[in-house]
Image: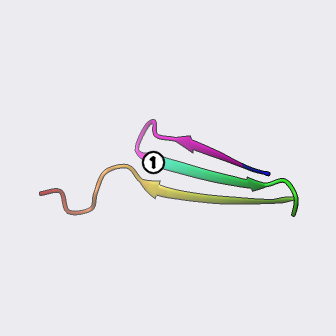
Amino acid sequence: MYRIGVDVGGTFTDFTLLDENAGKLHYHKTPSTPSEPS
């Protein structure tokens, strides 16, 4: 089973993916504001 979490508050957006069968947690953080807004 997979579980997904997303936090969109503040200056960063955080993504997590938990693979319960493999016992692995994947994590990614990215800026919420684009580097070159139009």
Residue 9 located left or right of residue 18: left
The image shows residue 28 at horizontal and vertical percentages of 58, 59
Asked if residue 30 lies left or right of residue 33, the reply is right
Q: In which quarter of the image is residue 24?
A: bottom right
- Amino acid type, mark 1: Phe
In the rendered structure, does residue 31 fall within the stretch colored magenta?
A: no
For disc 1, the marked residue is 12
Picture residue at 65% right of the left edge, 58% below the top:
27
User: Hey, which residue is sitting farthest left in the picture?
Assistant: 38
Classed neighbour count for the residue bearing mark 1: other residues with Cα under 10 Å, few (<14), some (14–19), many (≥20) = few
User: Which residue is at the front of the view, 35 or 8?
Assistant: 8
Residue stretch in magenta: 3-12
Secondary structure beneath dot 1 equals strand
x then y, percent, for residue 14: 54, 49
**At x 11% / y 57%, what residue is drawn?**
38
- Tell me the quarter of the picture where residue 22 sits: bottom right
Scheme of colours in the image: rainbow
Relative to 24, is 28 on the left or the right?
left
10 sits to left or right of 35: right
Whether residue 24 is situated above or below residue 14 in the rendered picture? below
Residue positioned most to the front: 1
| Magenta residues, dominant SS class | strand
Relative to 3, is 25 above or below?
A: below
Query: Percent position (x, y) of residue 31?
Result: 40, 54
Which residue: 84% across, 53% down? 20
